[in-house]
Structures are given as C-alpha cells and as structure tokens.
Amino acid sequence: METYGYNNPPEGPANNPNYQSEKKLVAGILAILLGALGIHKFYMGYNKEGIILLLSTLIILPLLTIITCGVGSFLYPVVVVIPLIEGIIYLTMPDEQFDNTYIRNQKPWF
C-alpha cells in the first residue's frame, strides 16, 4: 500500500482542482436519454455541435422526410444512434481519460 505525504497527494478529482470528470456521468446520461437534441453537447460546452444535432433533429430531418415522401426518414436512427454511442463511451471511459479528451482537449465528437 502506498502512503502519500503532504507533498505527494494521490491523483484524482478530490486532489486536483482542474479535474472535471464529474461532468462525465451527467453528459453520458444526457447523451443516452436526450442525445438527439444535443443536450449533452450543450452541457459540455460544445455549442456548435449541440446546434447541429438540435437543428438536424427538429428541422432538417423532418423537412427531408417531407420532401422525399418518407424516404429521408431512414436518417433518424443515425441522429439517435450517434449520441447513444457517445453516451456509452462517456460512461465506460476512465475519469481521467474523459477529462483529458473531452474537457481539456475539447474533442467534440467521439
């Protein structure tokens, strides 16, 4: 068992003020439940990507479906599956890797 002195605290959210993996759980749940609306993207600060998901779900795909007489509706699962995959990735990723990838390095898509 390792012992940590005053100068060598263990790494992790309790001892690192820049560690923000607490967003991981909320972002993962939002991606799974409301992913097609891009809510998880807005929550993590990716406004452009959130707007893309929101507009594609509420405006672009319905118009495409109307214009193509229903043929465009095959794209709806894509808008639902991508955030679902992102949510699973968020929840299964180690906290520090999530923090490095999505919070510090600002990687917008999986």
Image (cartoon, rainbow, N blue to C red):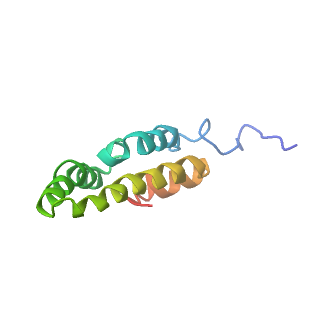
Determine the image quadrant of residue 40. Answer: top left
Q: Looking at the image, is 90 positioned above or below residue 22?
A: below
Asked whether, in this view, residue 95 is left or right of residue 67, the answer is: right
* 10 left or right, relative to 29: right
Q: Residue furthest left?
A: 67
Picture quadrant where residue 81 is located: bottom left
Residue appearing at x 21%, y 59% in the figure? 70
Quadrant the C terminus occupies:
bottom left
Q: Which is more toward the observer, 19 or 74?
A: 74
Q: In this view, does 45 lie above or below 109?
A: above
Q: Considering the image in quadrants, where does the N terminus appear?
A: top right
Total label count?
Answer: 0
Query: Nearest the camera: 60 or 18?
Result: 60
- On screen, residue 81 above or below 39: below
Residue 84 screen position, x and y as percent = 45, 51
Determine the image quadrant of residue 64: bottom left
Counting from the top left corner in percent of width and height, residue 15 is at 62, 38
Q: x, y percentage for residue 94? A: 62, 51
Q: Position of residue 75 (x, y in %)?
A: 30, 61
Is 70 on the left-hand or right-hand side of 107?
left
Q: Residue at x 48, y 44 (%)?
A: 28
Q: Which residue is drawn at 48% across and 55% down?
A: 85
- Extreme-front residue of the structure: 69
Which residue is found at the position 32% from the left and 51% from the top?
46
Q: Which of 20 and 46 is in front in this view?
A: 46
Work out whether residue 47 or residue 67 is closer to the camera in this orientation and state it: 67
